[in-house]
Image (spheres, grey):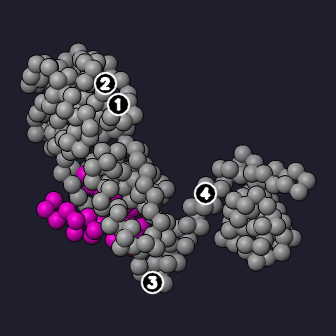
Amino acid sequence: MELTQLRMFCAVAESGSLARAAEQLHRVPSNLTTRLRQLEQELGCDLFIREKQRLRLSPMGHNFLCYAQRIIALSDEALSMVQTGDPAGNFALGSMESTAATRLPALLARYHQRYPQVALSLITGTSGEMIERVREGTLAAALVEGPVASDDLNGCQVFDEEMVLIAERDSAPLTDARAASGRTLFGFRTSCSYRQRFERWFQEAGVQPGPVMEIQSYHAMVACVASGAGIAMAPRTVLESMTGGERVSIHPLPTTISASKTFLIWRRDAFTPNVEALKYLIIEQFETQPV
């Protein structure tokens, strides 16, 4: 399997036409046909469904396209890095939703202005999901709750966050986990480190929370809590930045639960110029934060 074959495959898949792809690549259609057949024989499956003069991706072709695009992007980025040492190419960055909403808008705008040759894409998810995707190589770096103990990952602390407990606006003071026991919790998926931290608060107190209801966004979380349906834990910066945060009451948590640190992580063997540039831009922009 060669990069040339992958580029041919992607060109045909994206254009839907051998003729158009051949024109883009400055080759004759018969050459593409031969090379794509060789690729399919090597893979042992059909990447296209052939219908007279039309080509459609097969189910396996759709799956293979994602990998082919990533391989080409990494190849282009590696070539650019070797030739110039400057940030360039595709840069897939992962982030927790809270960090993306409160910390990244201005930062990514500055990154784009300073490094316009970088095509940056932002993917949000839980810390657990982002860590696995960095480990797999589908993300170049990610902003997650840390520190992260892993031999194949490296990282640095970039932000401090204060986690707070939120309840309906007229709630009585929730001074400890016992006062909140039995109440419904709102949180993200089980791979969310903040949810795990919240549940640990109850476990350490030896009490049981109520059922956990999974939600998809902080706006939904605040709306559910404001209605009196349950309680949740969120970064204070999120509540301060969003409309509707005044509809809930905020209750402090013990330092062991409230003190959270956000880390920028990357694979030890893939500290690319794109990641390095982001790291030092964060240091520059948030120099009052410990890094």
Question: Would residue 38 be found to the left or right of residue 209 on screen?
Answer: right
Residue highlighted by disc 4:
67
Q: How many marks?
A: 4
Q: In this orientation, does residue 29 appear?
A: yes
Image coordinates for residue 253, horizontal then vertical, percent: 12, 33
Q: Which residues are magenta?
A: 262-291
CA separation in Å, label 2 and label 4: 39 Å
Helix, strand or loop at label 3? It is helix
Q: Amino acid at mark 3?
A: Thr
Q: Earlier in the sequence, mark 4 or mark 1?
A: 4
Identify which amino acid the numbered label 4 is placed on. Tyr
Q: Residue furthest top?
A: 182
Query: Marks 4 and 3, how far apart in space?
Result: 26 Å
Q: Which tag is nearer the camera, tag 4 or tag 1?
A: 1
* Distance CA(mark 4)–CA(mark 1): 34 Å
Q: Secondary structure at mark 4?
A: helix
Q: Which residue is mark 2?
A: 224
**Which residue is the extreme one toward the bottom?**
83
**Marks 1 and 2, how far apart at CA:** 6 Å
Disc assigned to residue 84: 3
Do the residues bearing badges 4 and 1 touch, measured as CB atoms within 8 Å?
Answer: no
Of pointers 4 and 3, the one earlier in the residue sequence: 4
Query: Residue at point 30% right, 27% down?
Result: 223
Residue 272 seen:
no
Does residue 263 show up magenta in the picture? yes
